[in-house]
């Protein structure tokens, strides 16, 4: 038998998970949001933007009435896709266009021939926005937000394209430097060739299904689990962009307002360390959101984003 197919991989994980004796409902994390996400309304639509680095897939929600507010653009964490933000798209899409892109090589976007740098990824995202008509010469500027890997995409596009980005909201930023950066290099920049053994699949199942926030529905956890496997042995590509991105000088040149939404979790201290570097930075602590935050905390995050993005400059 050759490499495991995606279907066989998922089947192996499901079979193994049936042996688990610990209930997923015993995994609640202290400080986690205490309510399940709202039922999706089916408002999300899909599309493709043509760019010099290939087609970039996106999900989008358009409000029933044009409010004149700038669109909000989301950039996802590795190794997922715009699927990560479906609850947030419906939340923010109530009163503005809300779009989430798939990073090249992930989700349904075209895969580049080699790993891209953060600067290359960002140029692709900027080209995607321009192909949709945004920018000073089109429908105007956008607001951007990113999480984990996506926080650096949002950082770079804000620094590189002030003509395109009005404001930014960053969450869970991997602002690693010095010894911590080298530690993360050793942890994340590791070849993970596909094999016929199920250990990797079981690890992902445990992370995204067994140990999920108990308020996240099983089907939603399953969908995220499947996304975590899609990139296969190339999962490290986006991490390579993150770990070779010199973020410090980029934060120092950003002149737009930037909000740091500092949720609970392992990146809280690193996110907090960005504030002194920003010309127009603001920090809001949201420690109660620690797990599955874009699902169970969409209303909380949405409220903070609206309060910040809707205020006069």
Image (spheres, helix red, strand yellow):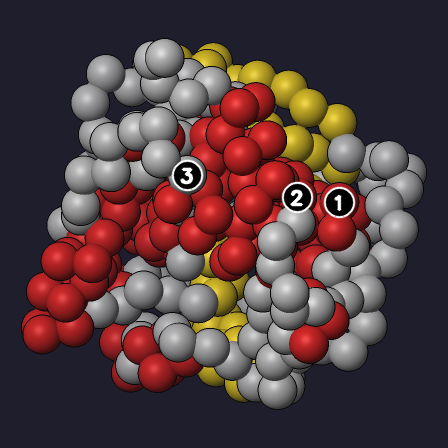
Mark 2 or mark 3: which is in front?
3
Q: Position of residue 225 (x, y in %)?
A: 57, 44
Residue drawn at the location 9% of the way across and 74% of the way down: 179
Q: Position of residue 245 (x, y in %)?
A: 18, 52
Distance Cα–Cα, label 1 vs label 3: 21 Å
Disc 1 secondary structure class: helix
Residue drawn at the location 31% of the way across and 49% of the way down: 156
Residue drawn at the location 69% of the way across and 34% of the way down: 60
Mark 1 or mark 3: which is in front?
3
Is residue 183 something one can see in this rendering?
yes
Please tell me how crowded label 3 is: few (under 14), some (14-19), or many (20+) other residues with Cα within 10 Å: some
Position of residue 108 in the picture relative to residue 276 (left or right): right
Distance Cα–Cα, label 2 vs label 3: 17 Å
Disc 2 secondary structure class: helix
Q: Position of residue 265 (x, y in %)?
A: 46, 77
Please tell me how crowded label 2 is: few (under 14), some (14-19), or many (20+) other residues with Cα within 10 Å: some
Q: Are marks 2 and 3 in contact (CB under 8 Å)?
A: no
Residue 252 disc label: none
Position of residue 210 in the picture relative to residue 50 (left or right): right
| Tag 2 residue | 222
First-in-chain label (2 vs 3)? 3
Distance Cα–Cα, label 2 vs label 1: 5 Å
| Tag 3 residue | 198
Q: Are marks 2 and 1 in contact (CB under 8 Å)?
A: yes
| Tag 1 residue | 219
Q: Position of residue 65 (x, y in %)?
A: 89, 40
First-in-chain label (1 vs 3)? 3
Residue drawn at the location 35% of the way across and 35% of the way down: 197
Disc 3 secondary structure class: loop
């Amino acid at each position: 038998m050759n490499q495991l197919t995606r279907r066989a991989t998922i089947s192996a994980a499901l079979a193994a998970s049936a042996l688990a004796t610990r209930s997923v409902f015993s995994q609640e994390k202290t400080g986690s949001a205490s309510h399940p996400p709202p039922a999706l309304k089916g408002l999300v639509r899909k599309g493709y933007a043509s760019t010099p680095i290939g087609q970039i897939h996106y999900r989008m929600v358009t409000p029933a009435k044009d409010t004149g507010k700038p669109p909000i653009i989301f950039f996802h964490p590795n190794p997922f896709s715009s699927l990560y933000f479906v609850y947030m798209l419906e939340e923010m899409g109530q009163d503005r266009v809300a779009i989430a892109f798939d990073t090249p090589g992930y989700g349904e976007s075209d895969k580049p021939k080699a790993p891209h740098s953060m600067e290359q990824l960002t140029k692709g995202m900027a080209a995607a926005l321009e192909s949709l008509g945004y920018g000073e010469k089109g429908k105007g500027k956008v607001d951007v937000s990113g999480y984990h890997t996506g926080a650096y995409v949002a950082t770079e596009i804000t620094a590189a394209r002030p003509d395109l980005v009005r404001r930014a909201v960053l969450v869970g930023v991997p602002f690693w430097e010095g010894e911590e950066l080298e530690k993360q290099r050793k942890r994340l920049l590791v070849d993970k060739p596909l094999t016929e053994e199920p250990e990797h699949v079981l690890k992902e199942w445990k992370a995204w299904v067994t140990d999920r926030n108990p308020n996240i529905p099983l089907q939603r956890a399953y969908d995220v689990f499947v996304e975590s496997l899609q990139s296969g042995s190339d999962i490290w590509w986006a991490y390579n962009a993150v770990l070779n991105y010199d973020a410090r000088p980029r934060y120092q040149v950003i002149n737009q307002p930037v909000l740091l939404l500092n949720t609970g979790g392992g990146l809280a201290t690193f996110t907090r360390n960005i504030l002194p570097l920003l010309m127009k930075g603001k920090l809001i602590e949201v420690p109660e959101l620690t797990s599955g935050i874009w699902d169970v905390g969409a209303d909380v995050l949405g409220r903070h984003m609206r309060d910040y993005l809707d205020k006069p400059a």
